Image: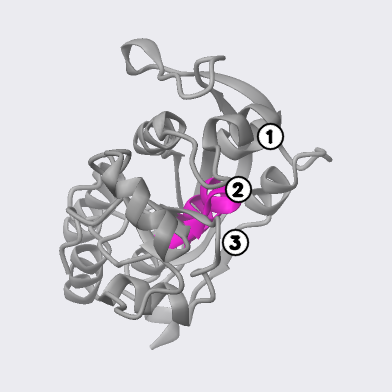
Amino acid sequence: MDNTNDPQIVLVMNEIDAINFRKKGYEKPGCKVIAFDGEFKSELAERLGKQNLLVDKNVLVKDLYTSDLTYYPLDTASKNIHVEYFKRYASVLSLLGVAKVYVSEVNTVNESESTGGSVKGGAAGLGGKVSGKYTSDSSMQELMRLKQSCVPKVDLQAAKKLMERFSLQNDQDLNRVIATVEAGTEHKSYDFFMVLSQKLQKVFDLAASITPYAGINIKADMARNKEITKTYTLHVIVEFGDPQENG
């Protein structure tokens, strides 16, 4: 499924406000306003309604790391997108002879200090860090608990199909693991850093640039709650098992 043209930001308003928002030209490319009380419901509106997301003044962010039509509320979008990406990644690894995938360390990524700013030169430094220690950042705590245990098995065709389904077919780390499996190379462990800040930061930039209207002021919300735009680097450890031992 290809949803590359789906809106990155969805604003939920009543029908009158939604009509006026469009008339004023506030609906930017990548942003869409949806009426929660409109008689006509688009496919996207129907889907959001079933997920109880079609609520007045809701600001929703699309998960750009999957081709599925998945949206999250703005205040939890970053954490949820990181969590779901890890789960999809681990699902592919479970078909490549992996016994366990887990996060050993989480860093916050320092973006521009200004709300809606972007990282100069595409590089970001590391901010706060947690590695088995307490942090007041609840998102970091949840990310540190990410772990998936698997019954080791190798099914390259199934793994490749899953990568296509999850839009991970060009992922360098997964392709590196596949190459070693195809070559018959034995590995006990493998580690890499999962960084999703680039696409997320662009979405937050777009969200912050949307004109405040009908009680929705995204830039002000971001200024009040710095947690909204936090992105993370996850140090992921992959431990291999012996598929032959499991039949």
Foreground pick, 152 / 5:
5
- Which residues are the magenta region? 71-88
Foreground pick, 8 / 175:
8
CA neighbours of label 3 inside 10 A, class few (<14), some (14 to 19), many (20+): some
Quadrant, the C terminus: bottom left
- SS at badge 1: loop
Query: Do residues under tags 1 and 3 come within 8 Å of each other at their CB atoms?
Result: no
On screen, residue 179 versus residue 77, left or right, reads: left
Which residue is identified by label 3?
Answer: 147
User: Three-letter amino acid code at disc 2?
Assistant: Asp
Measuring from the top left, give residue 124's x and y in whole percent: 46, 18
Query: Do residues under tags 2 and 1 come within 8 Å of each other at their CB atoms?
Result: yes
Query: Do residues under tags 3 and 2 come within 8 Å of each other at their CB atoms?
Result: no
Determine whether 153 is above or below 171 in the image: below
CA neighbours of label 1 inside 10 A, class few (<14), some (14 to 19), many (20+): few
Which residue is identified by label 2?
Answer: 75
User: Three-letter amino acid code at disc 3?
Assistant: Lys
| Residue 232 can be seen, yes or no | no
Measuring from the top left, give residue 129's x and y in whole percent: 68, 29
* Label of residue 225 in the image: 1
